[in-house]
Image (tube, rainbow, N blue to C red):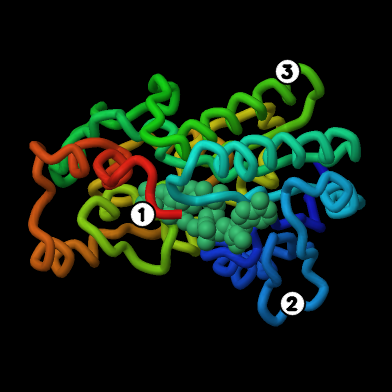
């Protein structure tokens, strides 16, 4: 497959979008930016909502691939999730299908499988105990459910239309891990860019689902489907462990927010203020 060059980055104004705007150009990509809110310092960014089908048709015109980050990134009301994450992702896929866009990298989430019990916090994680990529879906929120929908939409568009997608079940992609749980699910921004690059350039992905994290000593899931794309994580959250554990204590297996992949999404009020 010819290397994609021009990438539509939806959600470009958000936390992950901002990190990727800084890192992906070094891989040779030209980014076209899209978000519901203006992207600071980027006057050419497209400011439009995922509900705007005409804006999406314009946005995908001429791009080689899409990294789809836009959407509500935490729990919200079902109606808001429906509009932004479910209908919005459908609108993007339709625009991409019509335009013949090569590939979509979809920001799925660990919350698609958030009710899965974590394999424990033994260090290092025992061989064979890692959560496989084909573990049954167990969404922990309407938000997680929307990520299940996105993965299934991607599968439908591959089977029916030959539209390729890599669905990345991202753990926690922030500059640093900020909780003991994140020691297991953290993806450094640099590893995030490595994984997105691998997802954009691997041959014949069809619809592939991968976990997105660094090679954490305390990792909870199996990264082999990500590695099969050519992803080689270089970071590990372990240098942050002593400080975070001293501040917050070890994970408590009796606390559902500690003992399931989805962490606090299980126990926070299901509908957060919005
Ligand atoms: P964020 O909330 O910081 O950014 C999301 C962006 O999407 C915002 O700039 C927002 O304006 C835009 N957006 C929301 N609704 C929109 C709509 N209807 N139309 C157009 N733009 C809209 O979230 P973050 O952390 O940057 O996450 C990006 C994506 O990655 C999200 O889809 C999130 O679910 C997913 N993800 C992120 C993780 C992380 O650790 N940051 C972990 C797992 C998944
Ligand atoms: C997500 O899906 C969220 O978008 C992000 O803000 C984090 O909460 C992350 O999961 C996580 O599980 O830490």
Does 90 appear above or below 200?
above
Residue tagged 2: 42
Q: Residue at x 44, y 22 (%)?
A: 134
Disc 1 and disc 3: Cα gap in Å? 32 Å
Of residues 2 and 78, the one nearer the viewer is: 78
Query: What mark, if any, has residue 186 been given in the picture?
Result: 1
Q: Are marks 3 and 2 in contact (CB under 8 Å)?
A: no
Label 1: element kind: loop
Q: Which dot, 3 or 2, sits closer to the camera?
A: 2
The x, y position of residue 82, in whole percent, is: 59, 37
- Crowd around label 3: few <14 · some 14–19 · many ≥20 (10 Å): few
Q: Residue at x 55, y 41 (%)?
A: 81
- Crowd around label 2: few <14 · some 14–19 · many ≥20 (10 Å): few
Q: Of marks 1 and 3, which one's residue comes earlier in the chain?
A: 3
Query: What mark, if any, has residue 159 been given in the picture?
Result: 3
Disc 2 and disc 1: Cα gap in Å? 28 Å
């Amino acid at each position: 497959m010819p290397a994609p060059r021009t990438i539509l980055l939806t959600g470009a104004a958000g936390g992950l979008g901002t990190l990727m705007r800084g890192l992906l150009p070094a891989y040779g990509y030209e980014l076209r930016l899209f978000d519901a809110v203006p992207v600071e310092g980027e006057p050419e960014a497209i400011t439009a909502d995922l509900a705007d089908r005409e804006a999406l048709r314009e946005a995908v015109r001429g791009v080689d691939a899409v990294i789809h980050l836009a959407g509500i990134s935490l729990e919200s009301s079902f109606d808001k999730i429906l509009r932004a994450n479910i209908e919005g992702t459908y609108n993007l896929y339709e625009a991409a299908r019509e335009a013949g866009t090569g590939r979509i990298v979809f920001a799925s989430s660990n919350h698609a499988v958030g009710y899965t019990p974590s394999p424990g916090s033994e260090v290092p994680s025992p061989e064979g105990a890692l959560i496989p990529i084909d573990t049954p879906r167990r969404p922990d929120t309407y938000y997680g459910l929307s990520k299940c929908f996105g993965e299934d939409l991607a599968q439908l568009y591959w089977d029916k239309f030959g539209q390729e997608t890599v669905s990345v079940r991202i753990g926690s992609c922030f500059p640093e891990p900020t909780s003991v749980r994140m020691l297991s699910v953290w993806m450094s921004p640099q590893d995030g860019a490595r994984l997105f690059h691998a997802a954009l350039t691997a041959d014949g992905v069809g619809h592939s689902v991968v976990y997105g994290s660094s090679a954490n000593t305390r990792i909870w899931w199996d990264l082999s489907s990500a590695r099969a794309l050519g992803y080689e994580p270089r970071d590990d959250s372990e240098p942050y462990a002593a400080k975070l554990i001293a501040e917050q204590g070890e994970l408590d297996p009796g606390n559902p927010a500690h003992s399931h992949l989805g962490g606090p999404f299980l126990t926070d009020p299901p509908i957060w203020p919005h």
